Amino acid sequence: MGIEDSYLFGVMDGHGLYGREASTLLRMRLPLNLSLVQSSARKQSKLEFLANPSFRQHVFKKAYEKTNVEMKGSNFDPSYSGSTSITVFMHNSLLVCANIGDSRAIIGSWSEQNGWRTEQVSVDHKPETKGEYERIVSCNGRVEACRGTLALLLDGAGREVGPRRVWMKTKNRPGLAMSRSLGDAVASKIGVIAVPDVFEVKAAEEVKIVIVASDGLWGVIGNEKAMSIASKHHKENEAQAACEELVEEATKAWNRLGEVVDDITVIVVFLK
């Protein structure tokens, strides 16, 4: 985004037949669109971005909107494919997190008095959450786990299986397990939106670790456990080792559940 001493981290978790294409498009286009929206909105856009929270909100939301439009005009069919996205911008003590979907960002703070403390920065966009549920139902969608014939194939007894999902009112499709996503043209007609929640944190000196990851981690590893694993590697500044252990522990957890291992993407940032 052309701002000195700033960093942008992102996790894009694709799904559907063209999930890889969707997440790749996001990875390539979203950073460019953030810069384009920022620079085209103000003459002193870099200073304005750092000084004005409402401008930061505008930049992230417009950049996501622009990227979503590009995805729907891309060379793959986004009818039943798309991607979640979480991005974290950092500059000095400013941390801005924009999230669409069920990936998550957490921060870990250290003090001699209290040890490690964990704080969740983003909010997971799940269909059963009150505001998300109401929007989907008002758009003629429904929210429930797999059941009936589909559940019979998965469970053998026809019981509800898995997480709550988004469906058309009278058809068992698309079955998204999140309430916000980019792409997913069919789901966008029944209340699934591509509008990010944007959160800001003034990171005090005690903030030492940032973890950004897909739901493949958070579905089986809680915030506290994830921070406990990552913090073991902080003293030696081994962020890569922290990532590898988190992925390994999540994979073991999925295997213990006897389920297909979900896609696991993890970023660990150690701060001085």
Image (spheres, grey):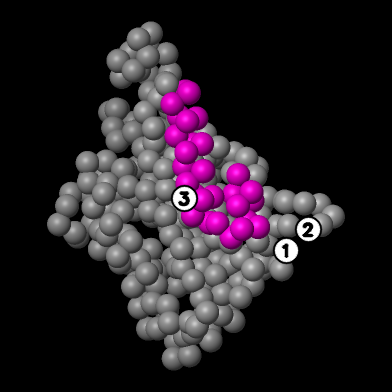
Cα distance in 3D space between marks 2 and 1: 6 Å
147 left or right, relative to 126? left
Residue most extreme to the bottom: 43
Residue most extreme to the top: 157
Quadrant location of the N terminus in the rendered image: bottom left
Q: How many marks?
A: 3
Q: Which residues are magenta?
A: 229-257
Residue most extreme to the right: 113
Which mark is first along the chain, 3 or 2? 2
What's the amino acid at mark 3?
Answer: Val
Question: Visible in this render: residue 128?
Answer: no
Question: Visible in this render: residue 234?
Answer: yes
Q: Nearest the camera: 126 or 90?
A: 90
| Disc 2 packing (10 Å; few <14; some 14–19; many ≥20) | few
What's the amino acid at mark 1?
Answer: Glu
Q: Which mark is residue 259?
A: none
Q: Which residue is mark 3?
A: 266
Q: Residue 221 appears at what percent x and percent y?
A: 55, 37
Q: Which residue is mark 1?
A: 206
Q: Are marks 2 and 3 in contact (CB under 8 Å)?
A: no
| Disc 1 packing (10 Å; few <14; some 14–19; many ≥20) | some
Quadrant location of the C terminus in the rendered image: bottom right
156 is higher (above) or lower (below) than 137: above
Q: Nearest the camera: 55 or 101?
A: 101
Element carrying mark 1 = loop
Q: Nearest the camera: 55 or 131?
A: 55
Q: Are marks 2 and 1 in contact (CB under 8 Å)?
A: yes
Q: Residue 194 appears at what percent x and percent y?
A: 38, 55
Residue at image point 77% right, 51% down:
115
Q: Which residue is mark 2?
A: 111
Which mark is first along the chain, 3 or 1? 1
Q: Residue 31 appears at what percent x and percent y?
A: 37, 69
